[in-house]
Image (cartoon, helix red, strand yellow):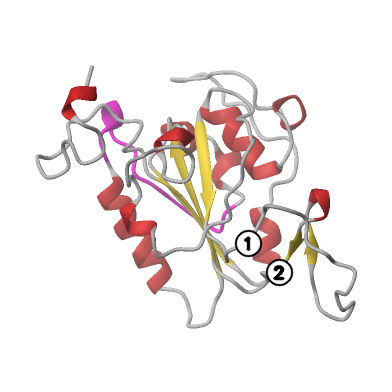
Amino acid sequence: EDSALTTSPPIDTSSPADTSSTSTTSPTNTAPGGLHLPDWRGMDLVVLHVDALRADTLPGWGSPYDTLPLTRSRAWLRVHGDVASAPWTGPSTASALTGVSPHRHGVRHVTSGDEPREQIQVATFPPLYAAAGYATALVTGNAVLTGNTSFTDPFEAAYHHHKEAWVSNQGEAVVTASEWIDGLDPGTPYLLWFQPMDVHAPYCPDALDDGAFIASSEVP
């Protein structure tokens, strides 16, 4: 239900790297399977969290259309085989923030209205970045996160752009994220979790965009 893409330096994931000659004096990380990763400490990290986005609608994951035209110049760490922990924002996001499954982090059910929100019961990763000197922020248009402090408290700053009926809010969210980054002290590394709701929203594309990513003959 939720897809999270993270910008990163390009990494060849076709086969585990040979780490036999790696210097022990250089800070490195080794992922499961022996994949050798560079040291990313001090680099900015942006997590793009998109609700209701199918992986096969993205170039590189199966789509024949250029559905991410503004990200072509970016380097991406492309991860294959991941499965959402649940078809619902709460459990999926909690798993992304903690690295554990719903039965461990405690967010398992759908809640709405005035019902009590289930709280994340284990540690999340954003405070680790804050402890390392990063500025951290959440910019979201999802009411599920807006109404639950266990999703917002891990970040030093949290901004909400939820509107009625899942109205498109990407423009406002982008402005908020840009202003937050511009307001940081020069040289401060940051972790930004950015979650627009445009893909989730029932919307009609502008004439300029209509038909850009799908042929009219393919529209049901």
Q: Which residue is mark 2?
A: 38
In this rendering, the answer to whether 113 lies above or below 60 is: above
Q: In the rendered structure, which amino acid carries the disc numbered 2?
A: Pro
Disc 1 from disc 2: Cα separation: 9 Å
Question: Quick check: can you spot residue 147?
Answer: no
Residue 210 location (% of width, % of height) = 15, 37
Residue 86 location (% of width, % of height) = 60, 24
Quarter residue 8 falls in: bottom right
Q: Give the camera-side residue of 219 and 14.
A: 14
Q: Quadrant for the C terminus, please.
A: top left
Residue 56 location (% of width, % of height) = 45, 34
Quarter residue 84 falls in: top right
- Nearest to viewer (mark 1 / mark 2): 1
Q: On the picture, is 87 further left or further right than 50?
A: right
Q: Residue at x 80, y 74 (%)?
A: 27
Q: Which mark is residue 11?
A: 1
In this rendering, the answer to whether 208 lies above or below 220 is: below
Q: Residue at x 71, y 41 (%)?
A: 99
SS at circle 2:
loop
Query: Given contact means CB atoms under 8 Å apart, are the residues at marks 1 and 2 in contact?
Result: yes
- Asked if the stretch drawn in magenta spans residue 156, the answer is yes
SS at circle 1:
loop
- Asked if the stretch drawn in magenta spans residue 1, the answer is no
| First to last magenta residue range | 155-168
Residue most toward the left?
207
